[in-house]
Amino acid sequence: MRILLPLCLCTRLAFADCQVPRPRWSLDTGSCFEAEREGYLRDGEHCVPKCAAGYYASVSVLSCVGEQMVPEAFVCSLVPMATLAHELIEDIPDSLRISRCLREASACSYEHLQYATYLAQGWHD
């Protein structure tokens, strides 16, 4: 008597996951904005690296290929002060008295700039 064993074609049901790199020594950063499943991405998924405010990531996209992250790591670097100052100045509405002082430092004395800052930040009663 011959016993026939069933043939099993096994397919992998789970996707290959990649662990997203996490910056060290920084509590207020994560790994990616899209990596909501505890820092993992599925094969073929992409995410945007996440750095703390005032920092920027060395790469714009992380990808999971097979079980490998591409690239394997990223660095969060401090945004140069000149860039931050330019972005802050661009966001200040012209209706605030401080706007002209920030755009043209020579237009205001130090005392005027200090007072304009005081008014703009709403510290007065």
Image (cartoon, rainbow, N blue to C red):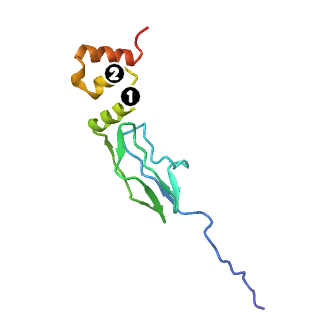
Q: Secondary structure at mark 2?
A: helix
The answer to which quarter of the image holds residue 27 is top left
Q: Quadrant of residue 119?
A: top left
Question: For the N terminus, which image quadrant?
Answer: bottom right
CB-based contact (under 8 Å), mark 2 and mark 1: yes
At 48% from the left and 58% from the top, the residue drawn is 18
Residue receiving disc 2: 98
Q: Is residue 95 left or right of residue 38?
A: left
Write the residue at 51% across / 53% down.
40
* Residue at x-position 38% and y-position 39%: 26
Q: Which mark is residue 92?
A: 1
Query: Residue 75 at what x, y percent from top left?
Result: 34, 48
* Residue 24 picture location, percent across and down: 37, 44
- Please provide percent x and percent y for residue 69: 43, 59
Relative to 20, residue 108 above or below: above
Amino acid identity at mark 1: Ile
Query: On the rendered structure, is 17 left or right of 100?
Result: right
Residue nearest the observer in this picture, 71 or 53: 53
State the residue in front, 3 or 67: 67
- Toward the bottom, the furthest residue is 1
Against 113, is 36 above or below? Answer: below
> Which residue is rendered at x = 35% and y = 36% of the image?
87
| Location of the C terminus (image quadrant) | top left
Q: Is residue 92 above or below residue 12?
A: above
Q: Which residue occupies the foreground of this view, 46 or 82? A: 82
- Give the mark nearest the N terminus, 2 or 1: 1
Where disc 1 sits, the SS reads loop
Mark 2 neighbour class, 10 Å CA radius: few under 14, some 14 to 19, many 20 or more: many
Q: Amino acid at mark 2?
A: Ile
Q: Which residue in the rendered view is the most extreme toward the top?
A: 125
